[in-house]
Image (cartoon, grey):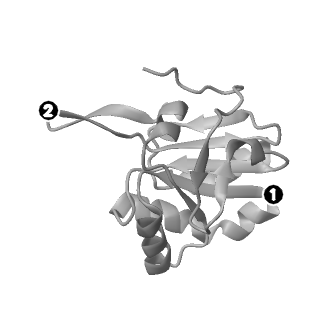
Amino acid sequence: MKKKCKIGDKIPKFKIPLSDGNLLDSKDIKDKKYILYFYPKDNTPGCTTEAKDFTNKIKEFKKLNTQVIGISKDSLETHNKFINKQGLKILLASDENGKVLEKFGVWVEKNMYGRKYMGIQRSTFLINEESKIEYIWEKVKVKGHVEDVINKIKSS
């Protein structure tokens, strides 16, 4: 079991593909704030609401010099269908092998109706201009989350 990332840690090293055809390389996460939000699956109710909430506030994130990127195990093809279907204005990254999820400590054992399985714990990381984790939201509840993130960025 990998140790979980914590506030003050430098982000782990990784490279994963983005929905715009570019590569998200951890060494490029600097010089502005980043929101890396991890979510279970494209086109599911909670994940769709969360992605739309981030999209609806994208202008505010830009004013705060903050890049928003959603990360799940979905393929780039699935991400792009999700983006087009929902009219999303955020970037999505594909971590199909789950290595980034593990490095951030969000690939966890879950329990539903007595059945244990591995899955993504909905989590959001605020990364500062020095590539360090400034804040972590774990076990995120979607309603009101994006407003909480914006308020945290404004106060940091």
Most extreme residue toward the right, as rendered?
A: 31
Of the pair 20 and 48, the residue shown nearer to us: 20
Horizontally, residue 111 falls left or right of residue 33, namely: left
- Badge 1 is on which residue? 65
Residue 3, percent from left and from top: 52, 20
Amino acid type of the residue tagged 2 in the rendering: Gly
Mark 1 and 2 residues: CB-CB less than 8 Å, in contact? Answer: no
Of the pair 131 and 59, the residue shown nearer to us: 131
What secondary structure is found at the residue carrying circle 2?
loop
Q: Distance between the residues labelled 1 and 2?
A: 43 Å
Neighbour tally class for label 1: few under 14, some 14-19, many 20 plus, Cα within 10 Å: some
Amino acid type of the residue tagged 1 in the rendering: Asn
Identity of the residue drawn at 42% across and 60% down: 75
Q: Dividing the image into 4 quarters, which one contains the C terminus?
A: top right
Horizontally, residue 9 falls left or right of residue 55, namely: right
Name which quarter of the figure residue 146 lies in. bottom right
Neighbour tally class for label 2: few under 14, some 14-19, many 20 plus, Cα within 10 Å: few
Of the pair 26 and 40, the residue shown nearer to us: 26
Q: Against 26, is 93 above or below?
A: below
- Badge 2 is on which residue? 114
* Disc assigned to residue 103: none
What secondary structure is found at the residue carrying circle 1?
loop
Q: Against 115, is 91 above or below?
A: below
